[in-house]
Image: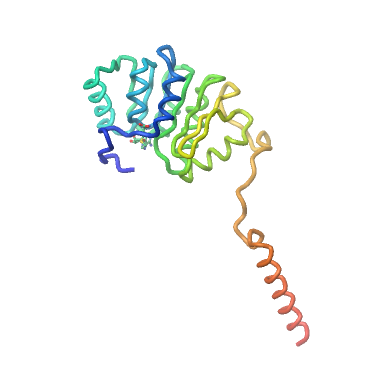
Amino acid sequence: MDLSDDPQLGVWSTDRDCYLLLAESAGPEAHTLETGSGLSTVLLAAVGARHTCITPARVEADRVLAYCGEHGIDTTSLTFEIGCSDDVLPRLPGEQLFDVVFIDGNHGFPAPVIDWYYAGSRLRPGGLLVIDDVALAAVAHLCAFLDRDPRWTVQRRTEKWVAYRRVTAGDLRQDWYEQPFYRPPPQRGLSTLPARAMRRIRAGRRRTSGTSAAR
Ligand SMILES: C[S@@+](CC[C@H](N)C(=O)[O-])C[C@H]1O[C@@H](n2cnc3c(N)ncnc32)[C@H](O)[C@@H]1O
């Protein structure tokens, strides 16, 4: 995404039903955290959440603040951390646990995974993790993992976004033997070919080796 792009409304946006879930889940007492900024940032400020937004572009933060100013939205509980989430999240100040985490920043691999790893570890048990743009490859990989990971349960899913409820507490560090649910992606190779194609290849190999043996 080109940060100099001029998004609709002057700020970025996603689906209405995603915003409704965020608004329902984050009242005035809620602590919320998001990667990327846009209408979601405006919304979380408008519901009075104590909201932290990580975005690399000061100009985007300024756009959000201007939009809130024009629409009479109080931004005293809104904090911007300017920087890339992979830099900012591991050093995010304080011990605060969050009630809602919204991941919608850099969508290239492995950024959504990094966002999940650090922001998700600051989510309280029972807290909500919302992830946008699930059709994008890096996000789809993350969600394929989370769908199997017993530390998360799916709360809502659409073609555009998904919300998981966190079951556990603490950091998300695990070694491979703690993840028996995790499977390698399908191998690219002969074994992924349709059965008929495999039979033909095997038959061809038998013919070839038969010919060379007869020579
Ligand atoms: C699709 S927009 C977010 C839309 C917003 N969540 C909404 O629903 O209104 C993506 C955002 O991610 C930000 N972004 C891009 N790279 C980032 C990074 N490395 N860390 C954090 N945010 C990033 C962009 O500047 C932009 O604000």
Name the image quarter holding residue 194: bottom right
Tell me the quadrant of the picture where the N terminus can be found: top left
**Left or right placement of residue 197 versus residue 111 in this view:** right
Expressed as whole percent of the image width and height from the top left, the position of residue 132 reads 44, 35
Most foreground residue, 114 or 53: 53
The quadrant of the rendering that contains the C terminus is bottom right
Using residue 175 as the reference point, say whether residue 214 is left or right of it: right
Q: Residue furthest top?
A: 29
Name which residue lies at 53% across and 42% down. 141
Q: Above or below — where is 32 with respect to 164?
A: above
Q: How many marks?
A: 0
| Lateral position of residue 67 relative to residue 207, left or right | left
- Residue located 72% across and 73% down the image: 203
Q: In the picture provided, is 56 more to the left or to the right than 133?
A: left
Q: Residue 13 at what x, y percent from top left?
A: 34, 33
Q: Is residue 135 above or below residue 188?
A: above
* Name of the residue lying farthest toward the bottom: 215
Quadrant hosting ligand 1: top left
Instruction: Indicate the position of residue 29 as horizontal and vertical percent values.
Output: 43, 12
Q: Position of residue 34 (x, y in %)?
A: 41, 27
- Please say if 213 is above or below 62: below
Instruction: Residue at 52% x, 34% y: name it.
Output: 157
Colouring scheme, one of rainbow, by chain, secondary structure, one colour: rainbow
| Image quadrant assignment for residue 45 | top left
